[in-house]
Structures are given as C-alpha cells and as structure tokens.
Image (tube, rainbow, N blue to C red):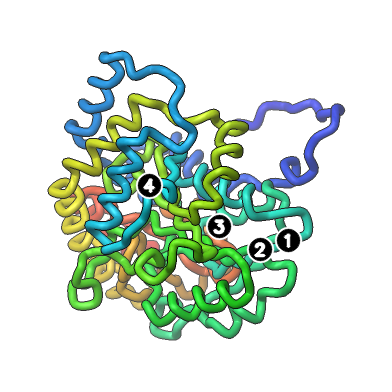
Amino acid sequence: MAAFPQPPLTPPLNPVAAALEPSKIVEVWQMGFEIEDLIALYVGEGDEPTPAFISEAASRALREGHTYYTPKHGLPALRRALTAYLARHFGAAVGEERVTVTSSGMNAIMLTLQAVLTAGANLVAPTPVWPNVLSAARIAGGEVRTVPMTVLPEGGVALDLERLFAACDDKTAAIFLVSPSNPTGWVISEAEQQAVLDFCRRRGIWLIADEVYHRFVFDPARFPSGVAPSFLQLAAPEDPLVVVNSFSKAWCMTGWRQGWLVHPAALGAVLGNLIEYNTSGGQSFLQHGCLAALTEGEPFVEALVARCGQAAELVFQGLAALPRVSLARPAGSFYCFFRVEGVDDSLAFAKRILTETGVGLAPGSAFGPGGEGHLRLCFAGSPQRLGEALERLRPVLS
Ligand SMILES: Cc1ncc(COP(=O)(O)O)c(C=O)c1O
C-alpha cells in the first residue's frame, strides 16, 4: 500500500504504543490486495461464510429488538450454554460464574493480560506463537519472555519444560500456552499439561491457556473424544488458570468478534470492571448467534473439522514431497508450519511467493524466536483451492 506522508506527532504518546511494530503477516496480507486470482492462505480463516442458522439467529434477534446494553459477562443464556458445551466436550463442571463472554478471542487475551500484568511483571510464552499475544502483553504493561520450542530435525516442535520453567522468576505473572498451536499445529500432551499446571500452582503464577483451536484435532487414535486436551479437565475451580476461547474458528465466525473466558470465580469481578472500561459489554444480537452456534452447531463443526483433517493430509503430503521442505504432520489447529532449506528471510520469501505465484503465506519470522526460515499455510479453505495452491507453490519451493 502506498504510504501517505505523515507529519510527526507532537503531543505526548504512550511509548509502548508508539513502539509497537506492525504485524508481518499483515504486511504480506496488504500486498495481496493488488494480486489477481489470489489464493489467500496467510490468515487464520477459511473461505466459507458463517453458516446460515447462526446468521439467521442473530438477524432474528436484531429484528426482535435485542439492541440494548448487555450484562458485562455476557447474556445469562449464553453463559449457561457455554457451561453445557464445556461439560459435553470436556466433561468439565464449570459454573456459570466462571464464564465470561468477550468481544473476540483477542479481547479475551487482552482483558486477561490487563488483569494479571503489572509494570515490571513478565509473561513467559513458548514460541513460535501467534504474535498478537506478545504485543498485547506489552500494551498491558508487562515484559515478554519468549522460550523457543525445540525444532525437531524431522520437522515439528517440542516443548522443553525445563527451559520454560527456568525462564520464570519472581517477577513472572503468567505462562501463556497455545494448544493446539498457531502456528505450529503442535498439541500439548496431558503429562505436559499436568507438569505446567503443577508448576503454576506451586509458584502461585497464572496459567493462561489459549484453546481457540480445541476442535481442530485430526488423529482419532490420539484424540478419541474429538477435542484437544483442555486444562479444564485437570484443574480445580480455584486454580490460577484462565482459558481463552473464541467462536471464530470452529463456527466460521471470524468477523463476528466473539469469544469467551473460563476463570476462577474470584477473577470475575476484575474482568467485569475491565470490560466496563474497555467495551462496556458485548452485542446482544450477536450473542444470540453464538447461542445458536453452541446449541445447533455440532453437525456443522464436525463436517468442518473432517474437511480440515483431509486438507491437513493433502497439504502435508504435497509439501513433504518437496526436497527443500521439512515439516511435521499437524496434530491440530489448521496450519502447516514448514521449514524451507536456504530461506533465512521468510518475510522477503513470502512476498516473493505472493508476487510470483499469487499464493499468500505467512512468514515464520512473524511468530517470534524459532519461526525464521519457516512459512505458515492455513488449510481451512476449500480442498480444490488448496490443491491449486500446492501446484503453484511446487516450483518456488523445489
Ligand atoms: C492462537 C489464537 N488465539 C486467539 C485468536 C483470536 O481469535 P479471535 O480474536 O478471532 O476470536 C487467534 C486468531 O487467529 C489465534 O490464532
């Protein structure tokens, strides 16, 4: 995009806000506006609109006049439906008072970080990770400590628990874990979950678990219940655990900006105040759409996840056949994160791929330490477009 001349700002500016860097994913994404016949695989969404039964529920609520201010923690019916959803999928008994509806998963992260971080406190996060988390921590006043995951020679990553725990000190407020992972597709094991939860309990620090991709797991032998393991299955209600979630991914609702948090009951009042001073609550008619997603959405979610599982295999096989590419079969989320031999500037390479092939990929360097040399491909879209993308990518990755 053409840069417009900008006169310097003279009134005071928050130095943390002023120092924020634009997302490298967005940098490539913006270039894509100029590309004809683009196959956009750089952002975390597919090409299907929200299913009609969800949109219709929201439209109906709008027509019926659900247009007023809402309770800070969300409509009671939606909070109840979320507790039923968590019981159904994880066998977790979560009381309504522990559920807070938020204006997106991103907002859920920001509210949590605003609640737990203070100046001088740090947030410890394994990387590669969705970069918005790290910027949100800085905006909330914290310091960010990244802990690169171990890159395995055969492709894929592993969590080094000793390294993670060694990065925590008496200034650590929270560990932030994303599983299933954006960008790597890694899924935490139950033994690792138990170790991290025990560590956070012992040290009296928060565990913030981002489970936005909990529905996207592809190996029925490893995940027989069809969901990724949730910390809610291990934790007691009063544990220092906050689980971040979203309607965006499983119900194709990225543009709706609806999410939720599960937290200890005692954190509810703090979150309520932060919601008051951030958004003053969510949108009533959209929350009626979310209610329909939870109560009627199972067939849709199951079909979407099955299609993503096939796409994961298609993309994995297509990329693994290329000699310069190394990657692991993604266990979860809807991304392939692959290394390309000889690439040491993934941002420049992603831009080159976009202009030469019309396929939009996210540069690995956007995801923090351990990401450089990789590219991220989102396989949530149609299999036919993914097949075409693989055809176009073959020459430039060979
Ligand atoms: C790991 C992770 N967490 C949270 C979010 C936020 O989701 P949303 O703000 O669309 O609800 C995303 C979006 O891509 C994500 O990848």
- Camera-nearest residue between 91 and 27: 91
* Cα distance in 3D space between marks 2 and 3: 24 Å
Which one is earlier in the sequence, the residue at label 1 or at label 4? Answer: 4
- CA neighbours of label 4 inside 10 A, class few (<14), some (14 to 19), many (20+): some
Amino acid type, mark 4: Glu
Q: Residue at x 53, y 82 (%)?
A: 160
Q: Which residue is tagged 4?
A: 96
Q: Quadrant of the C terminus?
A: bottom left
Residue 183 at least partly seen: no
Amino acid type, mark 2: Ala
* Cα distance in 3D space between marks 4 and 2: 26 Å
Query: Looking at the image, is mark 1 or mark 3 nearer the viewer?
Result: 1
Which one is earlier in the sequence, the residue at label 2 or at label 3? Answer: 2
Question: Quick one: SS at disc 1?
Answer: loop
- CA neighbours of label 3 inside 10 A, class few (<14), some (14 to 19), many (20+): many
Q: Which residue is tagged 1?
A: 121
Which mark is on residue 173? 2
